Image (cartoon, coloured by chain):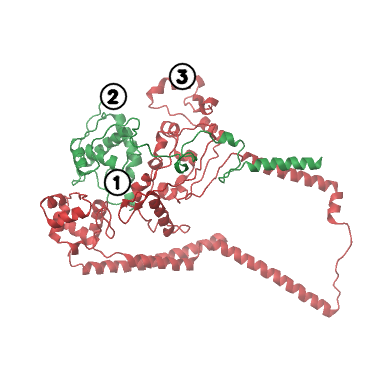
Amino acid sequence: MNKFNFILLAMFAFTIFSCADEDGKGAQYFPNMMYSDAYETYGEYEIFYEGQEAKLPVEGSISRGWMPYEYEDNLDGYDAAKAELRNPIAYTEDNMQKGTELFNIYCAVCHGAGDGKGILVKNEKILGVPAFDDQGRAITEGSVYHVTKYGLNTMGSYASQLSQKEMWQVNMYVMKLKGDLDGVEQPPFENEQ
Amino acid sequence: MRKVTLNQGILKYFLLSILIFSLSSTYAQEDEASAESTESAIPGADPVAGKDLFNSLCAACHKPYKDGVGPALHGVTERRDMEWLYKWIKNSQELIASGDSEAVAVYNEWNKVSMNAFPQLSNKDIDDILAYVEQPKPEPKKKEAEAGAAVADGGGGSGISNEVIIGVLAFVLLMLAVILYLVNKTLRKFAEVNGVEVEEKKEKGKPIWVAFAENQFLIILTVGVMLLVVTWFGYGALMNVGVDQGYEPIQPIHYSHRIHAGDNQIECKYCHSSARKSKHSGIPSLNTCMNCHKQIAEVSDETATEEYSKEFYDGEIQKLYDATGWDPSTQSYTGETKPVKWVRIHNLPDFAYFNHSQHVSVGQIECQTCHGPVEEMEIMYQDSPLTMGWCINCHRETNVKMEGNAYYEKIHEELAKKYGVEKVTAAQMGGIECGKCHY
């Protein structure tokens, strides 16, 4: 009887310890309920090339909400966008507020409040961030959008982090900051339909 | 006791480093002074004012001693004529258009990237900037500081205290044992000489385990204690099944959240941008890293800690460059990439649904509420247990933000009336119904 108890205990202990994951995590009670049979985001599966689930989109695929952008990533494209391109979204308080939030997440680390003195510049990690009222650059809605989309010099592209609409919302706030630096009065918001 | 010695160590280290710093800075000042006096190309220019201008206007593309988007500027006054430089900096495109051969050659050599016009700069401003970039590279100052730090490390020794204390204790213990043995030996010798017989106790009695087995009280006590111990540890072990709190795997690149989110205050959502609109918080693709690390190829001296040296961090940035195929010497991508295999830390069971955007964008919950003090983590770990009890608890305690949400105004009002409360919690809104997360 004693021996039987001991064997039972040993079997129980073995069951518990054998549930431990191979990836160094703790034990799992029901591993088949923990892990999905279906392929999951960022998973590693044999069926994919090099086992990698995360992939680049197929060439030529178009994401939801995508709108064509005619200007090319070169100097001519920049000049053309600077001259012609205008913000297509409505000038509303809502858009401005969303733009402000996004600006503070993605841009303010370097651009600060438009003065080019964000925390990374203060810490001397990234240098050469111009203020929005820089005369040599003389930014416009179009040039700001073009640079947000493609990047320029040190600044990278933000197209992977922001949707097109969001880029225009940020753009709106950028132009407000430029107006503040130039001392220009802001126009009143449009009403939402 | 330990605290006191530690403080002294730190104090010593601090004083020493202050001394060295002040010494090295005086040297550096002398260096600067001599540089200024030997600078015959630009008399009367102020390199300090030039540094400010350079950092805000030029540093996006130019570095003083290294090629960036544009060429390294150190020595430019020897390469070019001053008048030419004034014209070029104020409006390079105009100079190129005028057909200046030098200007066209530079433009073509640097991939036809046009330099911005700086009409706002006066000749004096340009003098200042050039005086700044023509300063000799501050190499000796850095080396001296490093040497100083090494000396201070040897002298102060605040980092090695633990090992030293344990070592000393072990040595003392060993000495005591040796002394005891020697004293015993000597005493026995004395006894022998004096004719005193040392009694060797050799009573034949019951073995101790038999005596123990015959004492019923002791047995009951032992069994009781053992049962309690087994229950305690067994319960603890079973409650940890499926819980990975504190899981801290080694990642392929040593990415420090402390440096990025803490010291440099980069928003969480800058890198984890899909947390705003997707189920997943998103592991940033490497182009997000390269937004900044195109520029930042090495960490500053202040970033390095005692545990992780500057060389270590620079090596980790190099791993990023290898993965993205970025060649810092030519400032371009080689096209050879190899993906980084990050180790997933947080994972919910397959039967529980969790959506980041719902919590981050709609609920406006701070990332730190669930992920803990990430901005202090040198190595990322799982801070919360991620158990169902933990989820439910937060849903019971967290009030829903109703203000300024016209769409839900009416339903919020009705819910508040139904429960007789002013603020509706997530649980009262249905946040603890089974089907909300398990389906």
* Residue for badge 2: A192
Look at label 3 and name its amino acid.
Glu
Look at label 1 and name its amino acid.
Met
Q: Is the residue marked by circle 2 packed among few (<14), some (14-19), or many (20+) residues within 10 Å? A: few
Using the numbered discs, state the Cα–Cα distance from disc 3 to disc 2 in whole angstroms: 27 Å
Q: The red chain is which one?
A: B
Residue A89 relative to residue B279: left or right? left
Q: Position of residue B296 (x, y in %)?
A: 35, 53
Q: Is the residue marked by circle 1 packed among few (<14), some (14-19), or many (20+) residues within 10 Å? A: some
Subunit of label 2: A
Q: Which disc is residue B425 wearing?
A: none
* Residue for badge 3: B414
* Residue for badge 1: A155
Is residue B79 placed above or below A39 in the rendered structure?
A: below
SS of the residue under disc 1: loop
Q: Which chain is green?
A: A
Residue B292 relative to residue B221: left or right? left
Front label number (3 vs 2): 2
